[in-house]
Each structure stands twice: as C-alpha cells, then as structure tokens.
C-alpha cells in the first residue's frame, strides 16, 4: 500500500522534474550500447557496465549510414546509422528507432511486421533476412546474416516495407503466375527466407563463439585477461553525467513536491510518537523513498514510460538500481580486488553520492495537513482533466489482481466479520464474481 501511495504522490514530481532526467538516462544507456556490436542471440555487447553481458571478443566493425525509404515513399529518406556486423533484425530495429523516434513504443511496428529490401543490381529487388539459403553454415551452426555478409556499402539506399499479411491466391494457370514465372527466369535466383524448423539440428550464432566447439572457438576468441574491464569503465564514463543528473534530481530540495515532503515528515512523526531509533527511522525512509520508488523506476523504466527495454539494456539498469540503493545507505562497504566488478566501477561514485544524499532527509521542509490535502485535491482535479481513465479497465485489473488471486481468503474474512454479515458483503461479492465470469465467457 505504501508503494502505491508513493507512486501517486510522486506523479506530479515525475512529470515536472525527475521524469525527464530518468528518461534521458535510459535513452543514453540504450544509445551508448547500440553504438557498439551486440550479439543478437546472447545480448552480450561491447559497450556495457554489466560484466556478465560484456562481449569479451575483438569484433571488427564499421559504422555505416543507410538511406531508408519507408514503405516505398521515395519523397523522404531517413539516414540511419548502423554497423556492418548488425543482423538484419538489428538493422530493422535501428531503423524503427530513428524513423519513429518521437513515437511511444506502443505505436512503433514490430520488426516482424517489416521487411528490409535492397533495390538495384542484377537481381533487382533483394529482401534481406537473418537466415536464408546463402547463410554461412559450419560445424552444425548457421551464422545470422549481417550487412557485411550481404556486402552492403555505406550510404546505400534501402526500403523498409510493411509486410502484406493477406495476398491474393496465384494459380499456376493464372496470367499473374505466368508473368511472375517469366520474370524469375530472366533474373538470378534470390535468397529466400527459410523456416527455422527446416533445420532442427542447426544452432544459430552471431558474434559470440562461446557455444562453438573448443577446437573452433580457440581460433576465434582472444583472451584479454583484465583488459576487458577497461570497456566497462569506458562505458561508465560515457554515462556518468546522466547518472549524476538523475541522482541529483532525486534529492533536489527546491523541486521536491509537497506530497513527497509530507510523506517523509509523516515518517518522522511516527518515529517520534513510537520512540523509534534514528537508525531504524532512516532505514524506513531509505526503503520507502529510494528502494521502493526511485530504484524501481530506474531499474524498470517501462513502469513509467511507454518503452520496450532492449535485452542488453536491462542488466545495466539493474546495476544502476543497486547503485541508487547503496547510495542511500550510509553503511561503508569496503572494496578490494575480490569485490564484484560493479562495486569497483561505482565505488568512488557511491561515496560521492552519499555525501550528496546524506543531509537530504534531515533538511526536508515540514508540510502542514492543510497544504498536503490542498495538493492532493489539485492532483485529483488534474488527473480528471489530463488523464484518460477507464472505470471498466480499472475494475477488471482490481478483480484480476485481488479477487481472482485471493478469492477464498476474502470470502472467509467477510464471513467472519459481523459488520460484513449484516451488510451481506459475501452475497454481493459472489454476484460480482458471477457477473465477471459471465462477461469473460461471453467475450
């Protein structure tokens, strides 16, 4: 319940202040990671702050710019930066991010709904796929096709097309079939996308050779020892300004909302009334303010924003979530060469953040009940005006979240309470359940 209340009272604060900083941090992580090679199958990447997701290989790659024509609309081309080691799916994803950069994720088409086409050359139109009949196969593995595999050059013009899900039937004796047949006889056979189920014995690979046989892997991998840690530090340096901005926004007294201040002051009053030790009270504040709110929003930005968090980004966000939690605790954790890499990465930064956060809770300005309820009233009116709120959707979510999950426990409690017996709450609840189940069946 505290978590739900906190999210409600922090809503306006997120809209006006910290929301932008959190979004910029998320986008910075995504952009930095996608600047370097990413293994499409494992999610391991060259640019990361998560050691377990580090691509521990030397990957030769070249940055290119593609001129993308969306759905055959030749009037406008979108320049998209890609790597020649990107798979076709990765290229399509980068195209979507560039073309629909001002759209929420829910309005961006999925890459499976799109095809990437290259026009020109003897073959005419060529549809690029991750796997086709010209994919490289070796030792039971098939390599995902990349731009380098297709010999795509810098500044090439390509078309991103919406796939046609419904096509007219073409019979062998129809004029259309004869025309298509004659056309195909005059050009080279084009690579066709293959069903992955056609090769059940074949495993796929992209950049990472960790799943190859030892004799093959030994010729591919490079043992960097501790040198690869430099990549982690380099990536952190690229992100540190965005991390600092986000952390500073969390403890900015000037922009701290009235409802946030009231909540923290309420904990102080409870601590005073019940003679709670200062260390315990501090732990309450850290848990409610940092761990349950800000750490969650940093670790899972899709809670707050309409975004689809890519696989390689998630582990980096999880590390930053832990950094936030540790920064709000005042326990000094010693670091040595045996410490986890993430502690080595952020050891000095956490010490700096603790100095910033240390006086935060003690310097929160008190808020009266009148000021708080006035703020809540404003928030309620603002939500009615600005937010699209569906009663039926909310009812369904509450029903699924509580009634379906705890049906027996709720009914037992209502039967034990004298007040609910007099008001016949059990009968009313069972009627609601019958209506919801009937509606679900009819739907």
Image: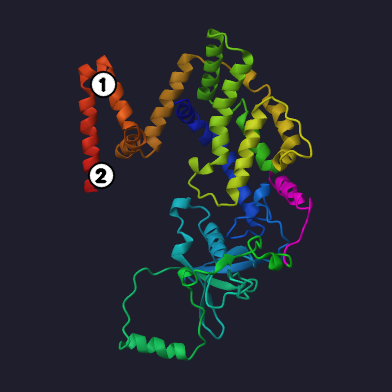
Nearest to the observer: residue 394 or residue 215:
215
Residue at 62% x, 72% y is: 139
Q: Position of residue 275 (x, y in %)?
A: 57, 8
Numbered circle sitting on residue 415: 1
Q: Circle 1: is it few (<14), some (14-19), or many (20+) Cα within 10 Å?
A: some
Q: Is residue 52 magenta?
A: no
Numbered circle sitting on residue 440: 2
Residue at 71% x, 45% y is: 236
Disc 2 on helix, strand or loop?
helix
Q: Circle 2: is it few (<14), some (14-19), or many (20+) Cα within 10 Å?
A: few
- Is residue 260 visible in the rendered image? The answer is yes
Residue at 22% x, 18% y is: 421
Numbered circle sitting on residue 64: none
Q: Position of residue 243 (x, y in %)?
A: 66, 40
Residue 158 falls in which quadrant of the image?
A: bottom right
Residue at 43% x, 26% y is: 378
- Is residue 61 visible in the rendered image? The answer is no
Question: Relative to residue 50, is residue 394 depicted above or below?
Answer: above
The number of numbered discs placed on residues in the rendered structure image is: 2
Nearest to the observer: residue 272 or residue 356:
272
Residues at circles 1 and 2 in contact by the CB criterion of under 8 Å: no
Nearest to the observer: residue 8 or residue 380:
8
Question: Relative to residue 188, is residue 255 depicted above or below?
Answer: above
Question: Which residues fall within the magenta stretch?
Answer: 220-239
Disc nearer the start of the sequence (1/2): 1
């Amino acid at each position: 319940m505290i978590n739900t209340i906190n999210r409600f009272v922090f809503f306006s604060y997120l809209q006006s202040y910290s929301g932008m900083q959190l979004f910029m941090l998320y986008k910075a992580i995504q952009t930095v990671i996608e600047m370097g090679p990413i293994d499409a199958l494992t999610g391991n990447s060259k640019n990361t702050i998560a050691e377990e997701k580090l691509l521990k290989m030397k990957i030769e790659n070249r940055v290119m710019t593609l001129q993308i024509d969306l759905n055959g609309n030749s009037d406008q081309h979108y320049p998209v930066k890609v790597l020649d080691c990107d798979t076709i799916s990765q290229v399509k994803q980068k195209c979507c991010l560039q073309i629909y950069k001002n759209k929420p994720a829910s309005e961006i088409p999925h890459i499976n709904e799109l095809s990437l086409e290259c026009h020109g050359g003897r073959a005419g139109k060529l549809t690029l796929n991750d796997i086709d009949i010209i994919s490289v196969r070796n030792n039971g593995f098939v390599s995902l096709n990349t731009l380098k595999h297709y010999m795509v050059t810098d500044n090439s013009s390509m078309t991103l097309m919406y796939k046609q899900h419904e096509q007219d039937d073409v019979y062998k004796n129809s004029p259309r079939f004869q025309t298509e047949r004659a056309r195909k006889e005059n050009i080279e056979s084009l690579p066709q996308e293959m069903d992955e189920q056609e090769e059940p014995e074949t495993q796929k690979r992209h950049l990472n050779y960790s799943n190859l046989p030892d004799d093959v892997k030994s010729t591919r991998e490079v043992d960097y020892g501790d040198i690869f840690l430099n990549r982690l530090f380099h990536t952190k340096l690229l992100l540190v300004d965005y991390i600092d901005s986000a952390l500073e926004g969390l403890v900015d007294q000037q922009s701290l909302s009235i409802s946030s201040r009231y909540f923290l002051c309420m904990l102080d009053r409870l601590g005073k009334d019940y003679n709670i030790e200062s260390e315990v009270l501090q732990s309450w504040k850290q848990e409610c303010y940092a761990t349950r709110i800000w750490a969650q929003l940093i670790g899972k930005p899709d809670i707050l924003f309409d975004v689809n968090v890519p696989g390689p980004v998630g582990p980096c966000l999880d590390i930053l979530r832990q950094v936030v939690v540790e920064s709000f605790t005042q326990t000094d954790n010693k670091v040595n060469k045996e410490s986890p890499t993430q502690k080595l990465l952020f050891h000095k930064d956490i010490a700096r953040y603790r100095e910033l956060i240390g006086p935060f809770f003690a310097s929160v300005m008190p808020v009266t009940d009148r000021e708080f309820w006035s703020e809540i009233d404003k928030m309620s009116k603002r939500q009615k005006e600005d937010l699209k709120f569906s009663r039926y959707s909310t009812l369904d979510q509450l029903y699924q979240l509580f009634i379906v999950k705890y049906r027996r426990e709720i009914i037992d409690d209502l039967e034990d309470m004298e007040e609910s017996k007099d008001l016949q709450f059990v009968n009313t609840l069972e009627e609601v359940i019958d209506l919801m189940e009937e509606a679900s069946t009819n739907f």
